[in-house]
Image: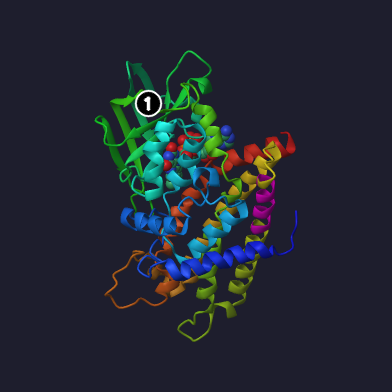
Amino acid sequence: MDFQPDLSLEAFRENVRAFLRDKLPADLAGRPRIGTRSPREELSRWQRILNEQGWGAPYWPTAHGGTGWNVLERLAFDEECTAAGAPTQDVGAQKLLGPVLNEFATPEQKVEHLPHIFGGTRTWCQGFSEPGSGSDLASLRTSAVRDGDEYVVNGQKIWTSHGHRADWIFLLVRTNTEVKKQAGISFLLVDMKTPGITVRPIHTIDGCHHLNETFFDNVRVPVKNLVGAEGDGWKITKFLLNNEHAAAADLPMLRRYMRQLGSLARQRDAEGRALIERPHIAQQVARFEAELNAIAMLVQRVAALEQAEDHSPAAHALGSMLKVRGTELQQRISCFVVEALGDYGPVAYAAPEGDASAEPLPMQEVARGMANELFFRRASTIYGGTSEVQRGIIARALFQL
Ligand SMILES: Cc1cc2nc3c(=O)[nH]c(=O)nc-3n(C[C@H](O)[C@H](O)[C@H](O)COP(=O)(O)OP(=O)(O)OC[C@H]3O[C@@H](n4cnc5c(N)ncnc54)[C@H](O)[C@@H]3O)c2cc1C
C-alpha cells in the first residue's frame, strides 16, 4: 500500500468539488441533516443533475452505464457530496439492488427497473430481516409458494427502512423447506402497491419515522419478478452484502461530524472563551482526530484490497474492523458534540429542518439536529451487521478462534 498523496485522486476530488459548486442548487444543499433519506422530489431532482453530468450511477462499472470509478474515487465522491450537503441518492437502489440487477437480472427486468433507478423515479426498500431472523438471516420464514405464473407470499419483515415511502421492495423469501436452509431462499422484486401488503410504522428514539414492519398476506407476485433462479437468493445476498467493505465505516459521515465539532470548538461561550481553549475539550478533539485518521488509513488499505479483488477472509475481516471502529466513533463524536454544547444543548434537540422564518438559534449551524444524530447512530452498531457479529468474523478470520 502506498501512503504518498495520490495526485490523480486529488484532481478527481477537485473536479467533484467544482461540479458541486456549479451544479448543486442552493435550495438542495445542506438539507439532509440527519441519517435519513432525502424527500423523493429532492432525490429525483438531484438524480437528474447527476445524469446530465454522466454521474447518474456513480458506483457502477461503465459497462452498466455507471461512471467506472474505482473504490477510492467512489469514496471521494461520497465525501464531497456529504460535505456539500447534497441530497442522498437512493442507497438501496444504487448500492444494493443496482449491482444485483446488473449481475443477475434478465434483460426484461433490466429494461423494467434500471431506467427508474437512473431517473430517481422508483424508490426501493430492503425486505430481508424478520422477527427472529436478523443476524441469522438464513433462518427466514416468509414463504413464497408457486401457483401457476405467480408466487403467493406470506409472512412478515421487520426494520424495513423507508418501506412506507418505497415504490418497490427487494425481498428474500423461502421457496423450498426441504433443502439446507440457505439453498431454499429466493430473491423477489415486489411492487409495494400489490394487494395484501401492509406497512406499519416503528417509531425510533430519534423521533423520526424511518423504520417499519411489513406484512405479506397472500401477496401474488409474478414469477417474472424472480431474480436469478429459484434457490439463488443466498448467493445473490452474499454478492449484495459483499459490496464495498471500504464504505463500512461511513467515513464521509465521520468527517462531517469532525467538521461540526471543529466549528463548535471555535465558537465562544457566554464568557467569551472558545471551547477549544478548555484542555479537556482540546484533548478529546485531538483524540477523535487521531482515531479518524487511523480509520481513514484502514479505509485506504481495504480499498487497495478491493481494487486488487482480494476476497480472502482476512480482507473481509478488515471490512468488519472498519464497521466496528467507524460506527463506534460515530456514536462517540455525536454524543460528545451534544455534551460539549453545554448550556446551548437544547439547540441540538431542535428539528433539523427548522423553521426558516424563525429567529436563528445560537450555534444552530453546528448544533441543530445533532441530538437526532446521536439517537439515530445508536442503531449504527446494529444495522449492516451487529458489532458482536463483526467481532465474531474478525475472531475467526484473523485469529482462527
Ligand atoms: C436502523 C435500522 C435499519 C435497518 N434497516 C433494515 C432494512 O432496511 N431492511 C432489513 O431487512 N433489515 C434492516 N435492519 C435490520 C438489521 O439488519 C438487523 O437489526 C440486524 O441484522 C440484527 O438483527 P436482529 O435485530 O434480528 O438482532 P439479532 O440477530 O436477534 O441479535 C440480537 C443480539 O444478539 C447478538 N448476536 C446475534 N447473533 C450473534 C452471534 N452469532 N454472535 C454474537 N452475538 C450475536 C447481536 O449482536 C445482538 O446484540 C435495520 C436495523 C436497524 C437498527
Residue 399 in which image quadrant: top right
Q: Which residue is at 47% across, 48% downward?
A: 379
Q: Tell me where residue 322 appears, x and y as whole percent.
A: 62, 49
| Viewer-proximal residue among 55 and 217 | 55
304 within the magenta span: yes
72 within the magenta span: no
Secondary structure found at label 1: helix
Quarter placement of the C terminus: top right
Q: Judge left or right: residue 301 versus residue 281.
A: right
Q: Is residue 62 above or below residue 87?
A: above
**Residue denoted by label 1:** 224
| Viewer-proximal residue among 372 and 355 | 355
Q: Tell me where residue 171 appears, x and y as whole percent.
A: 41, 32
Q: Tell me where residue 8 appears, x and y as whole percent.
A: 66, 62
Q: Which residues are magenta?
A: 296-306
Q: Amino acid at mark 1?
A: Lys
Q: Which residue is at 37% across, 50% downward?
A: 120
Residue 159 in sight: no
Magenta stretch, main secondary structure, is: helix
Q: Which residue is at 54% across, 59% downward?
A: 77
| Viewer-proximal residue among 117 and 360 | 117
Instruction: Classify mark 1: residues with Cα within 10 Å, few (<14), some (14-19) or many (20+).
Output: some
Q: Tell me where residue 340 appears, x and y as whole percent.
A: 50, 70
Residue 211 in which image quadrant: top left
Q: Judge left or right: residue 159 versus residue 336.
A: left
